[in-house]
Image: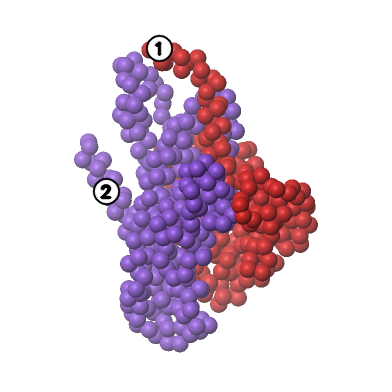
């Protein structure tokens, strides 16, 4: 009893301290990365290692942003991630809604197909993907990456949205149906606003997966100016040139948008996973 | 007249069409290409030279590294998934407590998920480095070790080092699934238990864990798939080591097609098919085992 009492007293102060420790446990590698971005590349690979830069260098970020190659990679990443996410939402919403609300022949087969797709990764199919886009003459195009990312993230989106649509009672739609609203109107006006958290969840998952996709981009995008960030920034450190500062500066720039996006929608995300998984 | 909630085939096609086209075009078609490639012989430049029958599959099965690669895959998937689930349960439990600054802590936990795996992998290859790694510098300074450890070169250390990174990047997603699951548990369930005087550990084991079961199931299956298919960590941290000594089936397959001396597209495709089969079987077995347990309990 005594223990509980004293814990109760120190809890308000102790919990944020533990929180800080947890936060640092997840952040420390990226703090090391930030420090590495603020020192000359040679200082990163000097023995013995020093935690703090021996010499500070403040120009890394302006160098990276000023680099034409970096801007081209950033453009690819933004175009590919945004376009894949838009396609996934546009394709997954009708499929999930329809399978959740209507009985028809092939419904189970379709849901099963989606489930199987979830188990395929672009990595295990990379040889087949390469051969397909090579024969379609789509190697080195945004379209190839967009289609691949959209297709492989579709399963998760359909799955989570299906759970959402199914969890909303049919009665909600019935009044509108009596008023003569067709399924498209009901979906747009009634169901989508109600399933906003699910939509947000599907969106962020797809965006992150597309933003960070590596293997397909590595294989399909051979033209340096067409590479996305994940692949492109690796050319800052190769056997020929070693710019660790720029590699890490560029990496930080690549992380920030995702974390900000996450911070904005975090509340919806938690709600989204709940309703989707528990039904 | 048709019963409500029923739909005809053509109408269904209209709603599902786009999804079907996307899946057929970018998942099924490459899978078929993969099967075709696995049955063909290729020149080193990737030109098809003719039928190979089952030669490629025999080639993969006869590869002297196959045993090592399969063992590595098993160790990698089991270790990463089990550790990830266990640690994430704790992290999620903490993240659902009320305290000052919780939002910021939640954002911090997200960062390893938001960062590209390649970037994190390269970062860790530097942190682990024998010569200028921060980790060795820190351990030496704290007198935990007297000589630096070759984390990425010493056979005993490579797998644990890779597993640590694998767990680190898998926790955020998993913890978020659990946070969502914990939020879904109604609070009156806990109040009843507290009135009954149950200890916190007992409450967690007898109430929280069973109610969290769907979330654990989902997180385990998704993690199995992601970890099995994980490429950048093993590929990057293992870069300096020759051969297949520390590869999993995924990097093994990739190296067969694009990095090995032979550049054997046919064998790589065959290995890819084995990969798809492996993960299918693993997931089905896992689902069977967990359902079987559920029936046994009730």
The quadrant of the rendering that contains the C terminus of chain B is top left
Which chain did the renderer colour red? A
Badge 1 and badge 2 in a common chain: no
Which chain did the renderer colour purple? B
Residue in the picture at 48% in, 85% down: B43
Residue in the picture at 40% in, 57% down: B156
Residue B246 versus residue A264 in the image, above or below: below
Which one is nearer the viewer's eye here, A172 or B3? A172
On residue A2, the disc is 1
In which quarter of the view is residue A181 placed?
A: top right
Which one is nearer the viewer's eye here, A173 or A261? A261
Instruction: Chain letter for mark 2, please.
Output: B
Between marks 1 and 2, how big is the CA–CA gap? Answer: 44 Å
On residue B289, the disc is 2
Instruction: Chain letter for mark 1, please.
Output: A
Residue in the picture at 58% in, 42% down: A28
Task: Tell me if B298 is positioned left or right of B25 in this view.
Answer: left
């Amino acid at each position: 009893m005594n223990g509980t009492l004293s814990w109760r007293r120190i809890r308000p102060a102790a919990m944020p301290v533990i929180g800080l420790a947890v936060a640092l446990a997840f952040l420390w590698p990226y703090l090391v990365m930030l420090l590495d971005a603020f020192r000359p590349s040679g200082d990163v690979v000097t023995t013995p290692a020093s935690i703090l830069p021996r010499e500070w260098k403040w120009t890394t970020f302006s160098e990276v942003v000023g680099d034409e190659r970096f801007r081209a990679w950033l453009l690819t990443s933004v175009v590919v991630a945004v376009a894949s996410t838009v396609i996934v939402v546009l394709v997954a919403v009708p499929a999930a809604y329809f399978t959740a609300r209507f009985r028809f022949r092939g419904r189970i087969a379709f849901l099963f197909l989606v489930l199987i797709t979830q188990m395929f990764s672009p990595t295990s199919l990379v040889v087949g993907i390469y051969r397909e886009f090579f024969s379609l003459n789509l190697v080195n195009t945004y379209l190839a990456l967009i289609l691949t990312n959209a297709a492989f993230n579709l399963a998760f989106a359909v799955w989570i949205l299906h759970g959402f649509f199914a969890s909303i009672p049919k009665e909600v739609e019935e009044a509108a149906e009596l008023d003569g609203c067709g399924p498209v109107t009901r979906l747009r006006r009634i169901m989508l606003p109600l399933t906003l958290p699910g939509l947000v969840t599907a969106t962020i998952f797809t965006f992150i997966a597309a933003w960070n996709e590596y293997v397909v981009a590595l294989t399909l995008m051979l033209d340096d100016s067409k590479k996305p960030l994940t692949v492109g920034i690796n050319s800052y450190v190769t056997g020929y040139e070693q710019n660790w500062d720029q590699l890490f500066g560029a990496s930080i720039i690549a992380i920030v948008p995702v974390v900000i996006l996450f911070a904005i929608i975090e509340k919806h995300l938690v709600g989204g996973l709940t309703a989707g998984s528990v039904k | 007249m048709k019963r409500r909630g029923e739909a005809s085939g053509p109408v269904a096609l209209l709603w599902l069409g786009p999804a079907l086209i996307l899946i057929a075009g970018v998942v099924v078609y490459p899978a078929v290409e993969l099967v075709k490639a696995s049955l063909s012989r290729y020149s080193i430049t990737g030109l098809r030279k003719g039928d190979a029958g089952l030669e490629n599959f025999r080639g993969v099965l006869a590869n002297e590294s196959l045993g090592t690669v399969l063992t590595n895959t098993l160790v990698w998937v089991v270790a990463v998934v089990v550790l990830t689930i266990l640690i994430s349960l704790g992290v999620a439990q903490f993240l659902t407590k009320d305290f000052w600054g919780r939002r910021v802590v939640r954002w911090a936990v997200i960062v390893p998920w938001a960062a590209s795996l390649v970037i994190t992998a390269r970062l860790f290859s530097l942190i682990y480095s024998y010569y200028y790694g921060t980790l060795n510098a820190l351990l030496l300074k704290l007198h935990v070790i007297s000589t630096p450890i070759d984390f990425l070169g010493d056979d005993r250390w490579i797998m644990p080092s890779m597993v640590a990174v694998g767990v680190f990047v898998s926790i955020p997603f998993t913890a978020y699934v659990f946070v969502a699951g914990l939020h879904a548990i109604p609070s009156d369930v806990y109040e009843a238990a507290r009135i009954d005087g149950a200890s916190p550990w007992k409450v967690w084991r007898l109430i929280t864990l069973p109610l969290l079961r769907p979330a654990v199931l989902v997180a385990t299956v998704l993690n199995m798939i992601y970890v099995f298919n994980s490429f950048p960590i093993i590929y990057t941290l293992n870069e300096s080591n020759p051969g297949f000594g520390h590869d999993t089936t995924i990097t093994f397959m990739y190296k067969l097609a694009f990095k090995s001396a032979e550049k054997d597209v046919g064998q790589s495709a065959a290995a890819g098919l084995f990969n798809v089969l492996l993960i299918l079987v693993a997931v089905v077995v896992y689902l069977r085992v967990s359902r079987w347990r559920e029936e046994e309990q009730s």
